[in-house]
Image (cartoon, grey):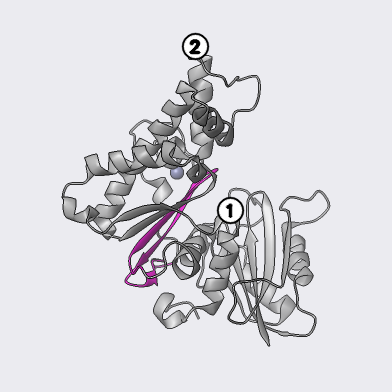
């Protein structure tokens, strides 16, 4: 029986799984820390693929979800903020030469969108926007049943839209991007700044403040934490209104750690979206929902890529 192997190179976790043909239930899964003192990341990727290689079955192909910007047509990592040694790095060719099976490489957030569309919250939709709100903000867009890629495959960076002129600096170096205001990192920085300026909170700047701690404190009634999530949700909702005006989707799926804050985030998103939309018809068939695939979204997205009818999804990717 043919098997597909999916790999997800995350900022903290490196995951791989092997999936028998036609199922989304893996037979083997390995999850390890991405960083390792004595090994390069490439060595770790080769090791983790080997660890899930089936004993008695043939591997039909490998798909890798990797941080971008990357060129999915060539399978080349252009630059990755967390992996300084991977600049113009031909990951697809190297892995293909090593294992001698077809390999595809895609942007992790793009593939998470593909995974949610094929196997998760977006099934049956033809026009979908996916946002992952965690350390940064990644995204993927499905329009007319196709993943939007652009000329060299680096389209759909919805986290790097400017939402606040002269706003805080983004991880990309520019200022006022949505990621610099509404990502988990940005929410934590905002709370730290407010506390440093005298705001009262159950959180203390003497311990590391994270988006997860803020969500817990907000759920326990901490007013500064509630305000932080409301602020992030409002910026997200305003940005989503812009995306909805451009793409007219029927579903916006929000994943990533921050999306687990629940209504404390989703209610301000809905309110800001309703306030910012210029015609109510955009909202008629629109759902804003949390992601369904959780931590395995990257793996299942990579699986969706390797299983795709590529003519309908990524026509240029051959
Ligand atoms: Zn940016």
Q: Is residue 105 visible?
A: no
Give percent across and percent down for residue 29.
72, 65
Give percent across and percent down for residue 242.
28, 48
Q: Which residue is mark 1?
A: 80
Give the residue drawn at x 23%, y 39%: 275
Callout in the foreground (1, 2): 2
- Segment tinted magenta in the rendering: 125-152
- For numbered disc 1, what is the local secondary structure? loop
**C-alpha gap between disc 1 and disc 2:** 37 Å
Asked whether 300 or 239 is in front, the reply is 300
In the displayed structure image, the side of residue 107 where residue 87 appears, left or right:
right
Q: Quadrant of ligand 1?
A: top left
Q: Is residue 153 visible?
A: yes
Residue 308 lies, with reference to residue 109, above or below; the image says below
* Quadrant, the N terminus: bottom right
Residue 230 picture quarter: top left
Q: Which residue is mark 2?
A: 198
């Amino acid at each position: 029986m043919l098997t597909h192997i999916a790999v997800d190179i995350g900022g903290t976790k490196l995951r791989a799984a092997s999936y028998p043909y036609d199922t989304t239930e893996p037979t083997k899964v390995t999850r390890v820390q991405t960083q390792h003192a004595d090994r390069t990341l490439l060595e770790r990727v080769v090791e983790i693929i080997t660890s899930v290689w089936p004993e008695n079955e043939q591997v039909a192909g490998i798909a890798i979800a990797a941080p971008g910007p990357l060129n999915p047509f060539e399978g080349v990592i252009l630059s990755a903020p967390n992996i300084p040694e991977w600049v113009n790095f031909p990951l697809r060719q190297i892995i293909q030469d090593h294992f001698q099976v077809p390999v595809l490489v895609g942007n992790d957030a793009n593939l998470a969108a593909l995974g949610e569309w094929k196997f998760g919250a977006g099934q049956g939709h033809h026009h979908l926007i996916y946002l992952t709100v965690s350390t940064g903000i990644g995204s993927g867009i499905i329009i007319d049943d196709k993943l939007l890629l652009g000329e060299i495959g680096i389209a759909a960076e919805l986290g790097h839209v400017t939402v606040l002129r002269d706003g805080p600096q983004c991880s990309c170096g520019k200022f006022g991007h949505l990621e610099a205001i509404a990502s988990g990192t940005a929410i934590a920085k905002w709370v730290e700044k407010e506390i440093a300026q005298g705001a009262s909170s159950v959180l203390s700047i003497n311990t590391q403040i994270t988006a997860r701690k803020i969500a817990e404190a907000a759920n326990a009634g901490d007013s500064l934490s509630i305000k932080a999530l409301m602020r992030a949700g409002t910026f997200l909702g305003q940005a989503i209104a812009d995306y909805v005006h451009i793409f007219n989707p029927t579903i916006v799926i929000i994943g990533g750690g921050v999306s687990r804050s629940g209504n404390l985030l989703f209610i301000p998103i809905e309110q800001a979206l309703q306030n910012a939309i210029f015609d109510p018809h955009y909202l008629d068939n629109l759902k804003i929902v949390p992601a369904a695939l959780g931590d395995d979204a990257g793996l299942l997205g990579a699986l969706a890529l390797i299983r795709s009818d590529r003519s309908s999804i990524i026509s240029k990717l051959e």
